[in-house]
Amino acid sequence: MCGIVGYVGRSEAAPILLDGLRRLEYRGYDSAGVAIVDGDKVETRKCAGRIAALGKLMAEKPPSGTFGISHTRWATHGKPTDQNAHPHFDASGKLALVHNGVIENYQALKDQLMRDGDRKFSSETDTEVLAHLIGKLYDDSIAEATAQDSNGNATNAPPLNQRGLLVDAVRAALRQVIGTYGIALVHSDVPDFLVGARRGSPLVLGVGKEENFLASDVSAIVAYTRDAVYLNDFDVVAVERDKFEISSVAGEAGSYQLSKVEFSDADIKKGDYPHYMLKEIFEQPGSVRDAMRGRLSSEECTAKLGGLNMSPAQLRDVGRVVLTGCGTALHAAMVGEYLIEALAQIPTEVEFASEFRHRNTPMTRDTLVFAISQSGETADTLGALRESRRKGYRTLGICNNVASTIARESDGGVYMHAGPEIGVAATKSFTAQVTIMTAIGLLLGRMRHLSTSEGTRIIDALNALPTQIEEVLKLSDEIKAIAKKYANAPGMLFFGRQFHFPIALEAALKMKEITYLFAEGHPSAELKHGIIALVRPELPSVFIAPDDAVFSKNLNNIEQVRARKGPVIAVTSGAGADRLAKIADDIITIPTAPDYVSPILTVIPLQLLAYHLAVELGRDVDKPRNLAKSVTVE
């Protein structure tokens, strides 16, 4: 959540910072601001609202300078107002700071600062407290370094090292902080110099030619450089035009690895699509194909997942699997539970990542844990991963960012290779995660009871998916018409059985995220256990009812809704369309596929249904209210 961009170089900073913020707006869009050093003063522009409002403000009075910082905010402490917008300043007004994360002990630090002097705070944020703290420590160190004896002679022999003192002040302040942070700061007395640091909130250094960058996401700077250093927790980086130095909060020298960004600037543009979400829905034939590329062995009738870093013997010894994630990733994990238990017959449990580390989950020695996160930076999922590893369990990651914290801290894992996902409502990352879960189920199953012929059938079904997804995407206009039909509905109910119950949950989540309508997902059989009280003529029910072993059970539930005059939208396949023709109001027919890949096909029309309904209602699809793409705070 929130986006940071910093720049130091020879070009004007303002257009680079503003462009970076536009690329990061999916991380937060409550307010935005820039601070650019021009000579001996800091030029600031900030306001509540979207990046466009900041752009207008900067166009009216352009700030000048070749180094600065910027921020787009998702509010935690304090309302989305001009005063609470970042950057924030210290008491001198010379130090400007932007911050992602939460300073948990900010009130205690603020009280101490107030006791130490008559300080005025102009915002409700925890960030301003950190700016004041760093500024005070820096000012104190400057005063001490320039102190004079009783004869008026300077007591310090070495020349004043303002850059070193500023970095020392940052380190000293962060050692007092409890919480998470990704920060970038400038000081008007320290020219052509940025300082950044991270703990629990991502920060990347972009390395250019006679210019360097800081950003909370590499997508902000990929148009300028594809050479990046992904900072680790407790790293502090001092950045100049032509060099940088990484150390720890404790002051120790740090190591780093220069990485090449996998995607290009073109990959993060919308192209001819009106929204990123629609673009990413239509990218799913490719993203599913990439998720399994090189990972299916027709010769051995199994999956090849070398990134798990586990030998065949270790994989055979797995007696229990725990899958953990948040939001959409949690729903992918729930599909994974059905897949692993069905294909490998290994007891599998899904845990909310936010609950996992706060409760005493019974786990046996042969438990294997998977932490699932698109960004690889989700705070709760990262916390669950660390708790699992602390207890000695082998913990693997499934994520989309090869340089993310989860990827670096896990014992192994599987990269999704889904490409950048900019739309806040996750789509292609979900189907990539489910594809990977299918491959994991196949791998573990083939080590146990699955025959070569069964393995071949699963591989054939997976290989057929990209073409089948293309067929589903051809239904977009048909689904758009259904969305228009129900544009005045107060909400929707979603129902599914077995593999498709998690799809009902995911479809309801998409509907909530981008239409703001009431939506709930349930197992179909739970209809008569209370939910049927909600059924009425104006509230449609969506049934995920492919032509499978439980189709007749779904049919019975649909009849119950129709008996109470509830409208029914059915997602089905094969002969199911004929049997539903007389009782469903609207039918979406997808290609026939086995149970273990069918969820990937059933979720896509429901992604399109949510999208088209949101557009019909005039919602901001890519930037839904109160949401941000990557949840890096608890």
Image: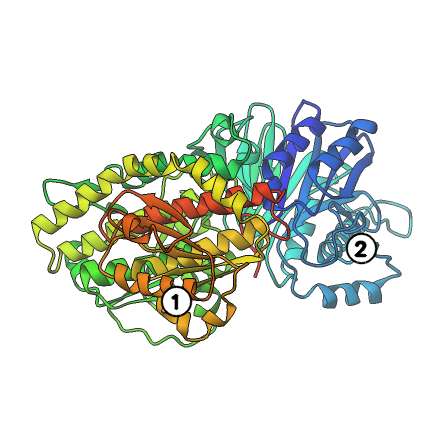
> How would you rate the neighbour count of disc 2 (Cα within 10 Å): few for under 14, some for 14-19, many for 20 or more?
some
> Mark 2 or mark 1, which is nearer the start of the sequence?
2
Relative horizontal placement of residue 68, taking residue 583 as reference (left or right): right
* Quadrant of the rendered image containing residue 114: bottom right
Q: Label 2 sits on what residue type?
A: Ser
Question: Residue visible at 36% across and 53% down?
Answer: 397
User: Which label number is shown at residue 613?
Assistant: none
For residue 162, say whether it is visible.
Answer: yes
CA separation, marks 1 and 2? 55 Å
User: Which label number is shown at residue 123?
Assistant: 2
> How would you rate the neighbour count of disc 1 (Cα within 10 Å): few for under 14, some for 14-19, many for 20 or more?
some
- Locate residue 295, reporting x and y percent: 23, 41
- Locate residue 470, reporting x and y percent: 34, 34
* Quadrant of the rendered image containing residue 616: top right
Residue 387 drawn above or below residue 223: below
Q: Label 1 sits on what residue type?
A: Gln
Relative horizontal placement of residue 443, taking residue 376 as reference (left or right): left
Residue 201 drawn above or below residue 361: above
Q: Secondary structure at mark 2?
A: loop
Relative horizontal placement of residue 599, taking residue 138 as reference (left or right): left
Q: Pointer 1: what residue?
A: 560
Camera-nearest residue between 64 and 320: 320
* Quadrant of the rendered image containing residue 283: top left
Question: Residue visible at 81% across and 35% down?
Answer: 43
Camera-nearest residue between 249 and 291: 291
Camera-nearest residue between 242 and 537: 537
